[in-house]
Amino acid sequence: MRRTLSIIALAIITVASPLFGAFNPVQADHLFDTDHFIEARTLLLDELAKAGTPKEESDILWRLSRVMVSIGDDLDKSDKEGRFAAYEEGEAYALRSIKIHPQADGYLWKASNVGRWGQTKGPLNSLAKAKGMLDDLTVIVNDFDTLDSSETWYVLSALYDELPPVISFGNNDWAISYGRKALEHIPAHLLYPGHYQKVASELWARNWSASKRAKEMKKMEKSWEKATTNLERYRYYEGKDGGSTIPFYSSVSLVKMSDRQEAEMLLSYALAKYKVFSPIKRADTREIEEIEALRSSWI
């Protein structure tokens, strides 16, 4: 039934779309949001041949970069060559988008494809790609002043969480702050269970008590006030008000619970939201299965 409704909606969009004129992203975005990634790629490539301005071409190219992340993610994890090819194609589209008409989405999906490539290749290759990813993400939040992109904050969080602090610039506390920012900007029409899982896992690993959180968040508040760039400031987002923030998934402030209490709360919230959310994407189902397994291991 869900797929039937999706096809009907797509047909309406197709009829309503102009045959000629400026690029209209509605149909391509709908295909992407409903897991029709191959169809979205085909449509975007067709639109690319008809692009009339550098801005239109750039808009199409970053969307192609975005869809390649999902095409790669949909492949079996054992198909590493297929994944490499998808992410490399996605990176190439993003590079073209940036060259033709620089915009935040081009840098975001370049970093996302590079990050996925590194995760598939292994830790040492991830390290080699990390500096370039950080440069791209810094352009987004500092130069473009884009602070409401959930995907950007998520990639920043993953970058700082996964890199080792001793031989690279990994930092679990900064990862948590960036992750909190990502959660606050999840688009209403998307579920993004992996965002909740990422922050929950980071909190579980840190394992601060409520009293420890209160002390540390006071320190973060001072750093938040002293920071001069967006990238620096949001490293301390968690303690921007000394921990008095009440998250949207909680009834108490950050300093009234421990890291692990909040971690369990995040997973429970994601699971509860999944039960009533629509539409559900393939990636949502995969991530919810991981969340259920993770939560079971904690209980």
Image: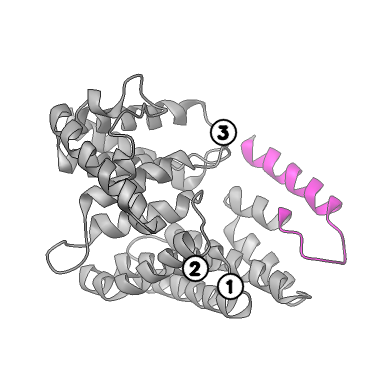
Q: Is residue 186 above or below residue 228?
A: above
Among numbered discs 3 and 2, the one appearing first in the sequence: 2
Asked if disc 2 and disc 1 are in contact, CB closer than 8 Å, the reply is: yes
> Label 1: which residue?
102
Q: Amino acid at mark 2?
A: Tyr
Q: Is residue 132 above or below residue 285?
A: below
For the record, the magenta segment spans 2-26
Q: Amino acid at mark 3?
A: Ser
Residue depicted at 37% across the width and 58% down the height: 228
Q: Within 10 angstroms of label 2, few (less than 14), some, or many (20 or more) residues?
A: many
Q: Marks 3/2: CA distance? A: 29 Å
Q: For residue 25: magenta?
A: yes
Q: Marks 2/1: CA distance? A: 8 Å
Among numbered discs 2 and 1, the one appearing first in the sequence: 1
> Label 3: which residue?
278
**Taking 105 as reference, is 122 left or right?**
left
Residue 44 locus on image (x, y percent): 67, 67
Quarter of the C terminus within the rendering: top left
Q: Is residue 184 above or below residue 45?
A: above
Residue 286 visible at all: no
The mark tally for this picture is: 3
Furthest toward the top, the residue is 251
Q: Within 10 angstroms of label 1, few (less than 14), some, or many (20 or more) residues?
A: some
Quarter of the figure with residue 8: top right
Q: Nearer the viewer, mark 1 or mark 3?
A: 1
Type of secondary structure dominating the magenta stretch: helix
